């Protein structure tokens, strides 16, 4: 059996199944929601039909070739304002290691001052 005829045959079967599911949903009449037994019966048929539709899409796209567009150059990252502020002497940023070293020096100075007092 040729692949395209199998896809067409299964596509028609899925359309008939979908029409049946819509008919089942219309059986509820003017009710705002479906009765539980009808809802479950529809879901019992809908889940396998959805899976079959996915497989049918994959089978139909089997020979499909996708041509990707050329890669666009990335936008340059915005430059940090930190070097400019540092050159002006108005920004001071410290790494965690620098901050820990400064805190240790501050504690050591406080201990020396306490000993001298």
Image (cartoon, grey):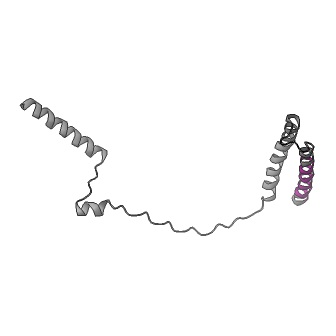
Q: Return the residue nearer the eye: 11 or 110.
A: 110
Residue 116 drawn above or below residue 61: above
Instruction: Evaluate whether residue 1 shows in this view.
Output: no
Q: Return the residue nearer the eye: 49 or 69.
A: 49
Question: What residue appears at the point 36 percent right and 61 percent down from the top-left corner?
Answer: 80
Question: What residue appears at the point 14 percent right and 32 percent down from the top-left corner?
Answer: 111
Q: At which x and y percent is residue 58? A: 78, 54
Q: Return the residue nearer the eye: 26 or 31.
A: 31
Question: What residue appears at the point 78 percent right and 61 percent down from the top-left corner?
Answer: 63
Instruction: Evaluate whether residue 29 shows in this view.
Output: yes
Residue 12 on the magenta span? yes
State the extent of the magenta-drawn residues as a range: 5-21
Q: At which x and y percent is residue 91? A: 27, 57
Q: At which x and y percent is residue 18? A: 89, 50
Picture quadrant where residue 104 is located = top left
Residue 108 on the magenta span? no
Residue 111 drawn above or below residue 33: above
Question: What residue appears at the point 63 percent right and 69 percent down from the top-left corner?
Answer: 69
Magenta part, dominant SS: helix
Residue 94 drawn above or below residue 109: below
Q: At which x and y percent is residue 100? A: 26, 41
């Amino acid at each position: 059996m040729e692949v395209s005829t199998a896809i067409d045959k299964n596509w028609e079967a899925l359309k008939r199944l979908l029409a049946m599911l819509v008919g089942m949903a219309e059986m509820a009449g003017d009710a705002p929601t479906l009765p539980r037994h009808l809802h479950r019966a529809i879901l019992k048929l809908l889940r396998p039909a959805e899976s079959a539709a996915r497989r049918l899409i994959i089978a139909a796209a089997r020979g499909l070739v996708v041509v990707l567009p050329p890669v666009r150059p990335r936008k340059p990252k915005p430059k940090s304002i930190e070097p400019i502020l540092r050159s002006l002497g108005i920004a001071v940023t410290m790494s965690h290691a620098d901050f820990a070293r400064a805190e240790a020096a501050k504690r050591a100075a406080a201990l020396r001052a306490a000993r001298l007092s």
